[in-house]
Structure formats: C-alpha cells, structure tokens
Image (cartoon, rainbow, N blue to C red):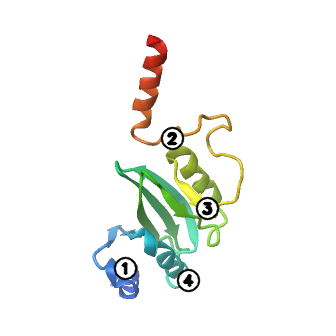
Amino acid sequence: MTNEEEIRQKISNKFNFLEGKIGISRVRRLTADVPQEKFEDILKYVIDEAGFIILCTITGLDEGENIGIVYHLARTDGIVLNIKIHVKKSAPVVKTIMNYFNGSVIYERELIDMLGVKVDGLPPGSRYPLPDDWPAGQYPLRKDWKAEMLDKKEVKNNG
C-alpha cells in the first residue's frame, strides 16, 4: 500500500461519509470533496493526525450556483491534499482557518476581493489584491462579472 493509499484509508476510516470521495490523482496528490459543515473537523484531523501542516494556498472557483473553495495542504514529505468545499454563490460564507494557519489571511482576503466570499472571523485589514477604491460588489473572478461590466459599459456608451 502506498503512502497516499494509507492516508486515504486513514481519513476514510475516521470519516466514513468520505468513503469514495477521496481520490489519488497522481503520485503525492490526494483530493477530497467534503461537506462544508464537516470541513473544520476534517481539517483539524488531517493537520493533527495525518501531518498536513503546511498551507500551500487556497483556491476559489466559480462553479455556477456554487463557489468551490480548495484548501491545498502539504506534508513535509511532499504529499499534497486538496480539500474542496462548496458554498452557495448567493450567500458565500466560510470560517477563517487563521487558528490553524496564520498565513491563510492573504488567501482569504483574495477570496473576499475576487469572488465575494465572506470569511467569518477574519480580522479587519487592507484589501488584497484589489485596490482600496475598487467598486463594491464587483468580483472579477465570478463568471458573470465580465458580462455585468460589459452591460454597464454599453449603457454608459449608449447613454
């Protein structure tokens, strides 16, 4: 059994609802699609029990009605686990993971600026990566953003 298979089995044994939802995409790469309400329990477990102590990045994806958020975690042996959750695009809210990874702040601010995700528990701070005078409610990584911007430009040019 490979290290990746052992990790998959260990997580599946602890969280039986993840059976079949943890994949090995290639050597040293695992993926898990998890329910948002179980995310923190799983995160704590993979940090404490499976050795995923490095936060590489957090990625946000516009999936239509949902926003997918992928937490890319690594172990010191180079094995990476990507944990994905889904939040409703109409009310996208996640809890900060600052208590586990101080460095998450910059990635969480990016989720706010680029996708409009609210991050509960994130302390006030400067925007990232957009400038402070960026228009409120404009999220450039949402698929419908360009269409909205084009419509506004058309109205301005025709008006």
Mark whose residue sits in front, 1 or 2: 2
Q: Residue at x 39, y 30 (%)?
A: 147
| Relative image position of residue 96 (x, y in whole percent) | 59, 64
* Quadrant housing residue 135: top right
* Quadrant housing residue 151: top left
Residue neighbourhood size for the residue with mark 1, other residues' Cα within 10 Å, grouped as few (<14), some (14–19), many (≥20):
many
Type of amino acid under label 2:
Tyr
Relative height, residue 71 to residue 140 (above, below): below
Mark whose residue sits in front, 3 or 2: 2
Q: Which residue carries the number 2 mark? A: 139
Say if mark 1 contacts mark 3, CB within 8 Å. Answer: no
Q: Which residue carries the number 3 mark? A: 104
Q: Nearer the viewer, residue 2 or 159?
A: 159
Q: Residue at x 42, y 51 (%)?
A: 89
Residue neighbourhood size for the residue with mark 4, other residues' Cα within 10 Å, grouped as few (<14), some (14–19), many (≥20):
few
- Of all residues shown, which one is farthest toward the right? 125
> Earlier along the polypeptide chain: callout 2 or callout 4?
4
Q: Residue at x 55, y 83 (%)?
A: 48
- Left or right placement of residue 113 versus residue 102 in this view: left
How far apart marks 1 and 2 lie (CA) works out to: 35 Å
Type of amino acid under label 3:
Ser
Q: Which residue carries the number 1 mark? A: 8
How far apart marks 4 and 1 lie (CA) works out to: 15 Å
Q: Secondary structure at mark 2?
A: loop
> Earlier along the polypeptide chain: callout 1 or callout 2?
1
Say if mark 1 contacts mark 2, CB within 8 Å. Answer: no
Q: Which residue carries the number 4 mark? A: 48
Q: Nearer the viewer, residue 55 or 146?
A: 146
How far apart marks 1 and 3 lie (CA) works out to: 24 Å
